[in-house]
Image (cartoon, rainbow, N blue to C red):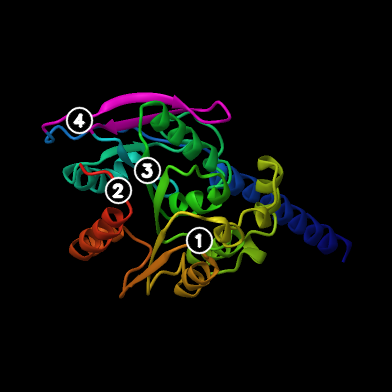
């Protein structure tokens, strides 16, 4: 009997140790940097300005700037989680063809930017503010911000810090709260809510990041947004579900528009519904820029 008890206790100890170690590794993966090489497509005849700029907290980020002569209106593109700036390239090509200056960058910990921890939009707001400062210093007077997923959440989290030069915001599939989207991701990859598999992962990640999950809520910040907002969601999106998109839309008090794309999951809305995207987003941007280009 004693032998069986010892074996049971040993098995429990091994299981607990394994759970702790796996949780620690999962937390590191969740917030760790995701570097990747980024290359401008050779098929494009024009070349961007390749540059490095600093965030407001001193992190070095890599970017492309597609300039236009005699134009002081610009679009900033923010990619999603675990992506880099080339995921926004199709939008950049289209917007540049319309005559806008276009600025797209790798968020902290992504692509070719400085390899620091990723914070799901929380500190990435400092990346965006650094990009806006860079554009201001180069004479841009009217700016729009377009973000996907984490990029969209980043813009909304910065709602009360966006300068008056930001004349329009397009938020594609933003999450409403970090807690909600974390739970959705755990369910998608483990079929269990975050309260089970993430019981230790979330506290470990919070400790390493220095803030609590509930501190990160676009839903709390969006009422502070002054710029006109075009929010886009997918009716089949499980990561940024329709109910949360509607909650965000209802919470916004600025000039606002909503587009729910039928059957779209958490994917690239530009490629999923390109013709409609070009018409709707193009019209929205044009209506909020006074500068001709």
Q: Within 10 angstroms of label 4, few (less than 14), some, or many (20 or more) residues? A: few
Q: Nearer the viewer, residue 244 or 253?
A: 253
Please tell me whether mark 1 or mark 2 is closer to you in this view: 2
Instruction: Indicate whether residue 47 is drawn in magenta.
Output: yes
Is 186 left or right of 275, judged from the image as shown? right
Counting residues from the start of the chain, the first of labels 1 and 4 encountered is 4
Q: Where does the magenta region start and end?
A: 45-70
Which quadrant of the figure contains the C terminus?
A: top left
Quote the CA–CA distance across marks 4 and 2.
17 Å
Return the x and y of residue 86 as percentages of the image width and height.
30, 40
Q: Is residue 120 above or below residue 278?
A: above
Mark 2, secondary structure of its residue: loop
What secondary structure is marked by label 4? Answer: loop
The residue labelled by disc 4 is: 69
Lower sequence index among marks 1 and 3: 3
Question: Which mark sits nearer the N-terminus, 4 or 2?
Answer: 4
Crowding around mark 2 (Cα neighbors within 10 Å: few <14, some 14 to 19, many 20+) is: few
Is label 1 or label 3 in front?
3
Pointer 1 residue: 175
């Amino acid at each position: 009997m004693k032998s069986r008890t010892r074996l049971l206790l040993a098995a429990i100890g091994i299981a607990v140790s394994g759970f702790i170690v796996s949780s620690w590794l999962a937390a590191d993966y969740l917030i760790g940097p995701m570097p990747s090489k980024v290359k401008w497509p050779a098929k494009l005849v024009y070349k961007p300005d390749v540059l490095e700029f600093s965030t407001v907290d001193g992190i070095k980020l890599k970017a492309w700037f597609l300039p236009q002569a005699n134009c002081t209106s610009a679009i900033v593109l923010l990619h999603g989680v675990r992506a880099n700036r080339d995921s926004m390239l199709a939008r950049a090509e289209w917007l540049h063809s319309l005559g806008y200056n276009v600025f797209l960058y790798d968020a902290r910990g992504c692509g070719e930017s400085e390899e620091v921890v990723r914070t799901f939009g929380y500190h990435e707001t400092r990346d965006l503010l650094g990009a806006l400062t860079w554009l201001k210093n180069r004479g841009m007077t009217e700016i729009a911000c377009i973000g996907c997923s984490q990029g969209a959440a980043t813009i909304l989290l910065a709602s009360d810090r966006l300068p008056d030069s930001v004349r329009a915001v397009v938020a594609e599939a933003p999450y409403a709260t970090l807690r909600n989207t974390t739970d959705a991701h755990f369910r998608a990859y483990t079929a269990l809510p975050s309260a089970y598999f993430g019981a230790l992962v979330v506290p470990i990640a919070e400790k390493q990041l220095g803030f609590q999950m509930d501190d990160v809520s676009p839903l709390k910040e969006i009422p502070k947004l002054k710029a006109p907002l075009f929010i886009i969601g997918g009716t089949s999106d499980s990561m940024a579900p329709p109910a949360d998109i509607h909650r965000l839309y209802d919470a916004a008090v600025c000039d606002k528009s909503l587009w729910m794309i039928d059957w779209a999951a958490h994917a690239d809305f530009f490629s999923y519904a390109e013709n409609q995207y070009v018409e709707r987003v193009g019209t929205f941007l044009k209506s909020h820029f006074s500068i001709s280009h």
